[in-house]
Image (cartoon, helix red, strand yellow):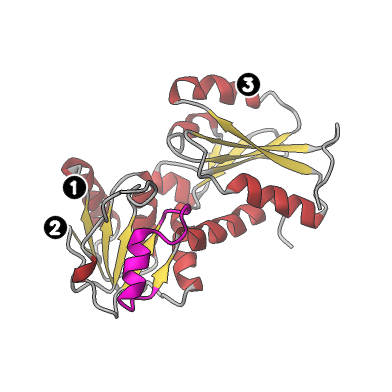
Amino acid sequence: MSRAISGATRLYVLLGDPLDKARSPEYYNAVFAARGIDAVLVPMEVAPAGFDALIRALKTVRNLDGLIVTMPHKQTVLAHLDRLGDAARQVGAANVARREADGLWFGDMYDGPGFVEGLRARGIEPARRSIYMAGCGGVARAIALALAQAGVARMRLHDIDAQRCAALVETLRAQYSRLACESGAADPAEFDLAINATPLGMRPGDALPFDVARLTPSTAVADVTTKPEITPLLAAARERGCPIATGRDMFEAQTALAEQLFGWSR
């Protein structure tokens, strides 16, 4: 059941560019309606050039309680936050922010923890597994650090940007000395879990991020893409008998963490 917006309605804003595939508005506004919360989440698609000005203006809105931040603004938003959670500090990015009682802003990063909990919801425990991951961008960085913290044994990273890949490998080695981490070929063979952390699969006609013929049925496959939920990669992996975890699994775990942060939990 929908709720009318009133002068007392609390405001949350989703910031990103683009936002056409974002699930947050439909999900959170349904939560507000179902739980009788007088609040609304509004999507605001803003290019990087306008981001800082928009944030400064939004922070003057007194009924604004929180922000959901997606690409490409997860790093830029840090300059507008007063306090950071451990994950945001470690990753160097935030995707959720809350106005505190004293008026200051607290931000944290739930991409990594959400991905790990999404795997566990599918019965895929990452501890002691060997991981292959395609992509080393912002989301991948958060996921890699969370997987390392969760106790994976080995990780191979691949990215078309070799320098970005090498930088993430160096970060992982410095922070988790017990982790066997390397950059390498786009080959998921002989790994327990293969992950797509690239944008491939969001658009019709995209190439697969790696060769599914190299997968065995015992290899779990995960994708961060939310729309479509079953990407061509996941469809091909499922045909080979592989367990899968979807971007929706990650999203639902992230939203549970955000609900706790904002105080909306059941």
Q: State left or right for residue 84 relative to residue 11.
A: left
Residue 128 visible (yes or no) = no
Asked if labels 1 and 3 touch by Cβ distance under 8 angstroms, the answer is no
Mark 3 / mark 1, whichever is N-terminal: 3
Quadrant that contains the C terminus? bottom right
Q: Secondary structure at mark 1?
A: helix
Q: Is residue 153 above or below residue 254?
A: below
Residue that numbered label 3 is attached to: 57
The amino acid beneath tag 3 is Ala
Residue that numbered label 1 is attached to: 166
Residue 109 visible (yes or no) = yes
Residue that numbered label 2 is attached to: 185
Mark 2 / mark 1, whichever is N-terminal: 1
The amino acid beneath tag 1 is Ala
Q: Which quadrant of the view contains residue 115?
A: bottom left
The residue shown at (39%, 67%) is: 150
Q: Secondary structure at mark 2?
A: loop
Q: Mark 2 and mark 1: span between their CA atoms? A: 13 Å
Q: Main secondary structure of the magenta part?
A: loop
Q: Mark 3 packing: few (<14 Cα in 10 Å), some, or many (20+)?
A: few
